[in-house]
Image (cartoon, coloured by chain):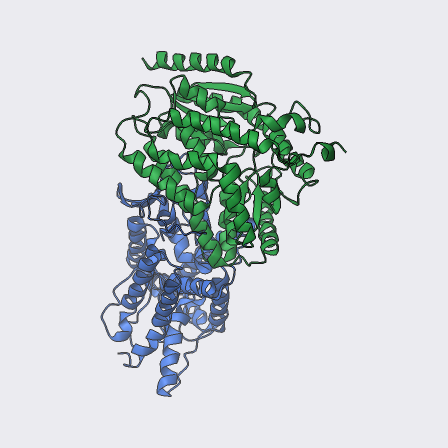
Chain colours: A green, B blue
C-alpha cells in the first residue's frame, strides 16, 4: 500500500513550524506597530509546540479533540459536548509532494496539503479523536473517504443548495445526528443550558471580530489585512474564550489608534475566494507589500466564518439547533448553488468598507470558486469596483509574476481614484 | 351592575397570565420587548373589561375581540366588541339606519389605518390568551407544531372567507328582517343558545374566555351556579382554540380571525409600517424564526423597504431581534423604534470553556 509506505512520523512538523515562524516574523516586522498582535504571532509560532502540549494536557484530563474542516461543523455543538474543536485545513507546501503519490496532481493544494499532513501523522491528527469532513466540494467530499484510512471520520452531508425546504431539513437532521455522535464520543449530554453557553461563547468571538472590522472602515486603516487574517485564522485553533479576550484587546487598541498603517490614499482592497491558510500568506502579503491595504475579506478563514451570529428564538435544544442550522448555511460557500447571497454580501462589504478593488484568491483547480468569479466580477463592475483574479497554489514559484499583476492592478486603481 | 365577586373571578384569567409570563421571565425566556408587550396586553385586558368592575369604560371600542355581552346579565346596554355591534347593527331592524354600521365600520377602519394591526399584537384579549398558551407550551418544553408552508398559506385565507360570510349573513338577515319580522324571529330561534346570535360571536373564542369563564368562576364561588345558555358550538370552537393555540403560536389570529382579516385590508395604507434597510439585511432568518404569524416576507424581501405584511400584527419581535438592526417601525414617516444596539456591540458574557 502506497499510503502505508509513505506514512511518516511527523517529520515535517518542524519544517512546517520553521515556515510559519519565518512568515510570522516577517509579518511582525512590518505590522505598523500594532502591539496587541503579539499574542497572535506568539500563538501561531507555538502551534506545533505550546498549543500541542496544551491539547495533550487537556486530553490527559479526559477532553476529546474534534478535528474539523471548512466552516460547517458547528463549534458550538463541539464545545457544548465538552470537546475541543481544532481546524485541520492546511496551507503547507511541504506535505504536497507525498500527497501527490496518492492524490491527483492537478488538484486543490489545500486538500493535498491537508491529506499530506495526515499521511505524515502530524500531531493535530494524532490528537484528534475524530475528524469531521463536510461534503462540500469534490475535494472535501473525497478527502473524508481518503482520511478514513488513518482516522475515524464523520462526514457531514451538506446540502447543495440553501434555497429549498428539504435541503434545510436535511441539514437540520445532520446537526441532530452530529450532536448525537458528539454526545456518544464525550459521554456528556448537550443540554440546552450548555448549548446556550457555547453559543454565547462563540458569538462573543464573532462580536470581537466585528469590533475589529469596524475600525477598518475608517479612512486611516489601523491594521493590515494580513494581520487580521492571521488573527482570525488562529481563532479556529485557539481556545475560544482566550482568543476572544485577546481579539477584544486588539479591537480596543485599534479603535484608539489615530494614525493608519498605510497611506490614507492607498487602494482599499477586499480579498475574497478560496481560504488563506497559514503559512501560505502569498496573496495578502503581495497586495499589502505593493501599497494596497486590505480592509475586509470574504474568505473561510476570516469574516465568512465569523461574520454572522447565531440568534436563537426560544430556549429548547431544538430551537438552538434550528438557529445553528440556519447560521451555518449562511457562510455563502461556493459549493451552494445558486449562491446569490455571496454576491449580495460582497456588494454590501464593498459599500460598507468603501472598497476600491477586489482581489479574487483562487486556488489551483478550485472549480466552485472559479465558476463564481465571473458573476462576481460582473456584479462588482456595476458598482465600479474592479476585480483581479489570481489563480495560484501553495508554491512560491509564481510570486514575482503575481507581484507584477498586483502592482499593475493597484496602479490602475490609483489612476482611477485621481 | 355586576356583583362585586366578579372582581376576583376575572383576576383568574388575568393573573394566571401574569404568573405565566413571570415564570417565563425568571427563566430568561422573555426579552424586554416581550415583557413590555405582555404588560400592555394585561393593562388592555383590564381596561377593556373595566365594565365588570362597574367602571364606565364600555365606550372603549377598539377593533379587538373582547366580550361582556351575555344574555343581558349585566343589564342593557351591555359591553360588546366593536365588531359585535357592527353585526348587530347590520342584522337587526336598524338596517335602515345605515349610518350606524357605517360609523362602526369607520371606527374600526380608522384604528387600522392609524396603527395598522398593532391592536392585535398589543391589546386584543384573544391574542393575549394565545400568547399565554404559547408561553405555557414553552415552559413545559414542548415543540411547536407548525403546519407545512402550503397548508399555512391555505389556512391563512380561511379568515377572509369567514369575514365575507359573516358580513353577508348579517346583511342578509338584516335586510330580510326589515322586510319581514318573522325572518328575524326565525333567525333568533334557529340558532342555539340565548346570548350570541351574531354569526361571528358564534365562532369567536372571546365569549367563553371573557364572559363565561370568569362568570362561572364567580358562580362557583358564591354557590349560585347560573350557567348561561351558550351554544355548544362555542365550546367546541373554544376547545379547538385552546389546543390550537397551545401548539401553534397565534393559531386563531393567523387563520381564523375575521376582524384581523378586515384589518389586513388596510395594512398597506396604514400610517404605521415595518421598514427594512435592504442593504443591511443578511437574510439570517431570525425574524422568520421568531415570528408568531409565520411571515417570511420580512426575511425574503430584497428590494422594497416597506416590508409590512397584511398578516403582520406589529408585535415588533422581529424589529427587536434583528441582529443587523435592519428593521424599524415607522409611524407617519418617522422611525419610532429600532430595537436595542447591534448584537456585537452589546456586552457579551464570554465564559471560559
Q: Is residue B40 left or right of residue B310?
A: left
Q: Is residue A415 left or right of residue A99?
A: left
Displayed quadrant of residue A29: top left
Q: Nearer the viewer, residue B142 or B256?
A: B142
Q: Is residue B282 left or right of residue A140?
A: left
Q: Is residue B326 visible?
A: no
What residue is at 66 percent from the left and 45 percent from the top?
A: A152
Q: Position of residue B272 (x, y in %)?
A: 30, 46
Disc tally is: 0
Q: Position of residue A50 (x, y in %)?
A: 49, 41
Q: Is residue B235 visible?
A: yes
Q: Nearer the viewer, residue A145 or B80?
A: A145
Residue furthest to the left in view is: B56
Vertical relation: A287 (above or below) A40: above
Q: Nearer the viewer, residue B13 or A266?
A: A266
What residue is at 37 percent from the left and 76 percent from the top?
A: B214
Q: Position of residue B149 (x, y in %)?
A: 54, 49
Q: Position of residue A62 (x, y in %)?
A: 56, 54
Q: Quadrant of the N terminus of chain A?
A: top right
Q: Nearer the viewer, residue B204 or B312?
A: B312
Residue furthest to the right in view is: A1
Displayed quadrant of residue B203: bottom left
Vertical relation: A13 (above or below) B219: above
Q: Is residue B60 left or right of residue A227?
A: left
Q: Quadrant of the C terminus of chain A?
A: top left
What residue is at 51 percent from the left and 24 percent from the top?
A: A361
Amino acid at each position: 500500500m502506497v499510503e502505508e509506505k509513505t506514512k511518516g512520523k511527523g517529520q515535517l512538523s518542524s519544517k512546517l513550524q520553521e515556515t510559519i515562524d519565518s512568515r510570522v516574523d516577517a509579518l511582525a516586522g512590518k505590522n505598523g506597530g500594532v502591539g496587541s498582535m503579539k499574542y497572535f504571532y506568539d500563538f501561531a509560532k507555538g502551534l506545533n509546540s505550546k498549543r500541542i502540549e496544551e491539547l495533550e494536557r487537556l486530553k490527559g484530563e479526559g477532553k476529546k479533540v474534534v478535528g474539523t474542516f471548512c466552516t460547517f461543523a458547528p463549534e458550538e455543538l463541539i464545545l457544548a459536548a465538552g470537546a475541543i474543536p481544532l481546524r485541520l485545513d492546511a496551507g503547507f507546501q511541504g506535505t504536497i509532494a507525498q500527497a501527490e503519490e496518492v492524490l491527483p496532481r492537478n488538484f486543490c493544494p489545500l486538500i493535498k496539503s491537508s491529506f499530506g499532513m495526515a499521511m505524515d501523522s502530524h500531531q493535530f491528527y494524532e490528537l484528534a479523536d475524530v475528524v469531521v469532513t463536510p461534503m462540500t466540494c469534490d475535494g472535501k467530499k473525497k478527502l473524508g473517504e481518503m482520511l478514513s484510512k488513518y482516522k475515524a471520520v464523520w462526514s457531514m452531508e451538506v446540502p447543495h443548495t440553501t434555497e429549498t425546504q428539504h435541503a434545510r431539513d436535511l441539514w437540520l437532521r445532520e446537526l441532530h445526528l452530529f450532536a448525537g455522535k458528539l454526545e456518544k464520543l464525550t459521554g456528556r449530554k448537550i443540554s440546552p443550558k450548555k448549548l446556550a453557553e457555547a453559543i454565547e461563547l462563540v458569538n462573543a468571538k464573532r462580536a470581537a471580530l466585528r469590533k475589529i472590522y469596524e475600525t477598518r472602515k475608517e479612512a486611516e486603516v489601523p491594521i493590515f489585512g494580513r494581520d487580521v487574517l492571521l488573527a482570525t485564522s488562529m481563532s479556529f485553533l485557539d481556545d475560544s474564550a482566550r482568543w476572544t479576550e485577546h481579539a477584544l484587546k486588539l479591537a480596543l487598541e485599534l479603535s484608539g489608534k489615530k494614525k493608519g498603517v498605510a497611506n490614507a490614499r492607498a487602494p482599499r482592497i477586499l480579498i475574497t475566494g478560496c481560504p488563506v491558510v497559514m503559512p501560505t500568506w502569498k496573496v495578502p502579503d503581495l497586495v499589502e507589500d505593493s501599497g494596497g491595504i486590505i480592509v475586509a475579506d470574504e474568505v473561510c478563514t476570516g469574516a465568512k466564518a465569523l461574520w454572522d451570529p447565531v440568534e436563537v428564538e426560544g430556549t429548547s435544544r431544538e430551537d438552538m439547533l434550528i438557529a445553528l442550522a440556519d447560521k451555518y448555511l449562511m457562510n455563502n460557500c461556493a459549493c451552494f448553488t445558486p449562491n446569490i447571497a455571496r454576491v449580495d454580501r460582497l456588494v454590501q462589504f464593498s459599500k460598507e468598507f468603501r472598497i476600491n478593488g477586489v482581489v479574487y484568491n483562487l486556488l489551483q483547480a478550485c472549480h466552485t470558486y472559479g465558476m463564481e468569479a465571473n458573476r462576481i466580477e460582473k456584479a462588482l463592475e456595476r458598482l465600479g469596483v474592479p476585480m483581479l483574479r489570481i489563480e495560484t497554489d501553495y508554491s512560491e514559484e509564481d510570486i514575482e509574476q503575481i507581484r507584477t499583476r498586483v502592482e499593475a492592478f493597484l496602479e490602475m486603481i490609483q489612476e482611477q481614484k485621481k | 351592575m355586576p356583583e362585586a365577586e366578579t372582581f376576583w373571578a376575572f383576576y383568574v384569567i388575568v393573573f394566571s397570565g401574569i404568573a405565566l409570563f413571570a415564570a417565563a421571565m425568571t427563566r430568561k425566556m422573555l426579552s424586554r420587548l416581550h415583557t413590555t408587550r405582555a404588560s400592555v396586553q394585561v393593562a388592555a385586558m383590564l381596561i377593556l373589561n373595566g365594565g365588570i368592575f362597574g367602571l364606565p369604560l364600555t365606550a372603549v371600542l377598539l377593533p379587538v375581540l373582547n366580550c361582556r355581552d351575555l344574555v343581558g346579565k349585566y343589564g342593557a346596554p351591555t359591553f360588546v366588541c366593536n365588531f359585535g355591534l357592527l353585526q348587530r347593527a347590520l342584522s337587526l331592524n336598524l338596517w335602515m339606519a345605515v349610518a350606524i354600521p357605517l360609523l362602526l365600520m369607520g371606527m374600526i377602519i380608522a384604528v387600522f389605518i392609524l396603527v395598522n394591526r398593532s391592536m392585535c399584537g398589543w391589546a386584543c384579549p384573544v391574542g393575549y390568551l394565545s400568547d399565554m398558551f404559547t408561553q405555557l407550551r414553552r415552559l413545559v418544553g414542548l415543540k411547536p407544531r407548525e403546519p407545512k408552508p402550503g397548508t399555512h398559506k391555505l389556512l391563512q385565507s380561511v379568515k377572509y372567507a369567514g369575514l365575507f360570510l359573516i358580513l353577508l349573513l348579517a346583511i342578509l338577515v338584516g335586510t330580510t328582517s326589515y322586510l319581514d319580522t318573522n325572518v328575524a324571529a326565525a333567525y333568533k330561534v334557529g340558532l342555539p343558545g340565548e346570548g350570541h346570535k351574531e354569526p361571528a360571536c358564534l365562532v369567536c373564542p372571546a365569549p367563553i374566555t371573557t364572559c363565561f369563564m370568569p362568570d362561572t368562576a364567580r358562580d362557583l364561588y358564591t354557590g349560585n351556579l347560573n350557567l348561561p345558555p351558550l351554544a355548544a358550538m362555542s365550546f367546541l370552537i373554544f376547545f379547538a382554540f385552546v389546543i390550537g393555540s397551545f401548539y401553534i403560536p397565534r393559531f386563531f389570529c393567523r387563520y381564523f380571525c375575521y376582524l384581523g382579516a378586515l384589518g389586513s385590508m388596510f395594512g398597506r395604507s396604514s400610517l404605521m409600517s415595518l421598514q427594512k434597510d435592504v442593504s443591511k439585511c443578511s437574510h439570517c432568518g431570525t425574524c422568520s424564526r421568531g415570528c408568531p404569524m409565520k411571515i417570511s416576507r420580512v426575511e425574503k424581501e430584497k428590494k422594497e423597504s416597506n416590508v409590512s405584511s397584511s398578516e403582520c400584527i406589529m408585535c415588533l419581535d422581529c424589529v427587536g431581534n434583528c441582529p443587523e438592526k435592519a428593521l424599524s417601525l415607522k409611524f407617519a414617516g418617522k422611525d419610532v423604534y429600532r430595537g436595542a444596539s447591534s448584537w456585537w456591540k452589546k456586552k457579551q458574557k464570554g465564559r471560559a470553556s
